Image: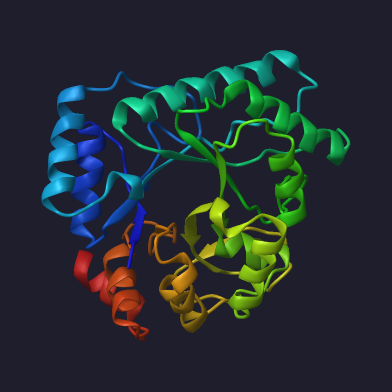
Amino acid sequence: MILGCHVNFTNEQLLGSTKQALSYGANAFMFYTGAPQNTMRKSLDMDLTKQAWSLMKENHIDLKHVICHAPYIVNLANNKEEEKWQFSIHFLKQELKRCKELGVSYIVVHPGSAVGIERETALQTISKALNCIIEEDGVMILLETMAGKGTECGSSLEEIKVILDGVESKNIGVCLDTCHLNDAGYSIQEFDLLLDEVEKVIGLEKVHCVHLNDSKNPMGAHKDRHENIGLGTIGFSALSYVVQHEKLKDVPKILETPYVERAYPPYQFEIESLKAGHENPHLLSDIMNFYK
């Protein structure tokens, strides 16, 4: 079971991220190379990176199961302001370079928001931007499925396909997000049918990451509000089924569930429950008691 969570990337950089993931019992993890709400980045320390690689090897974490996430403020969909659009392209090129230095193979990217331009044009604009960014033998960009909040692009598999079809390189993939899919109107409870649709529209070979999140919202709400595993509208059994699905056995599943009371990370307890295949009815109290 390849199961991990979102971790921090602070003073110890990738080494700190690895230590944090191990403390939660994870064998995969995802991180931002800086704050997700801005594009300020510190130089990478290769000594820390090499220590991280050694620690991963000692603890059987495959670097292919380590995922980077691009800041969510990057918008590839709208080029009305050419300078901002070009900045997004330039910044993502730099992020891919940083990922390569860290030995990371995948970076998850939100497709972007149309914000005042025709949706079809926005989808074409995303493909155009990706054609400027992607290197054939470099880090693979994974387009994340979105909830459809506001003018978000990529909230349907068909929109993801339109973007993919416009990309000249084959070095492009997809990240399925269970909360986003639910909020976009796809049933996680009928996951076999959903995977059949993914296979038909996109191709399962394109899926290289799953964000495993419950949702605070009913299916089709288009709101994107993550919930802890088993406490939302998707439910533990459906998410456990996703984790254990044979067709996705080689794909890392990454938890992005909220901190309890905005202070306490839930990942150790959620990972334990998912590995055991049994829901923890005392999840929140166990987390709070552990950290207090």
The location of residue 152, given as percent across then percent down, is 72, 45
User: Within the image, what quadrant is residue 168 found in?
Assistant: top right
Toward the top, the furthest residue is 83
Residue 174 image offset from top left, x and y in percent = 57, 49
Q: Is residue 249 visible?
A: yes
Q: What percent of the width, then of the height, locates residue 175?
A: 54, 52
* Quadrant in which residue 268 is drawn: bottom left
Q: Which residue is drawn at 65% across and 70% down?
A: 196
Q: Which colour scheme is used?
A: rainbow
Q: In this view, does 144 lie above or below 114?
A: below
The residue drawn where x is 26% and y is 58% is 27
Q: Is residue 10 above or below residue 175?
A: above
Q: Decide if residue 292 is in sight here.
A: no
Q: In which quarter of the image is residue 139?
A: top left
Direction right: furthest residue = 118
In the figure, 186 relative to 224: above or below?
below
Query: Which of the image's four quarters has the C terminus?
Result: bottom left
Q: Which residue: 69% across, 72% down?
A: 219
- Quadrant for the N terminus, please: bottom left
Q: In this view, does 251 lie to the left or right of 124?
A: left
Q: Where is residue 239 in the image (x, y as percent from the top left)?
A: 48, 75
What residue is at 41 percent from the left and 22 percent from the top?
97
Report whether 3 appears left or right of 111. Answer: left
* Number of marks in the rendered image: 0
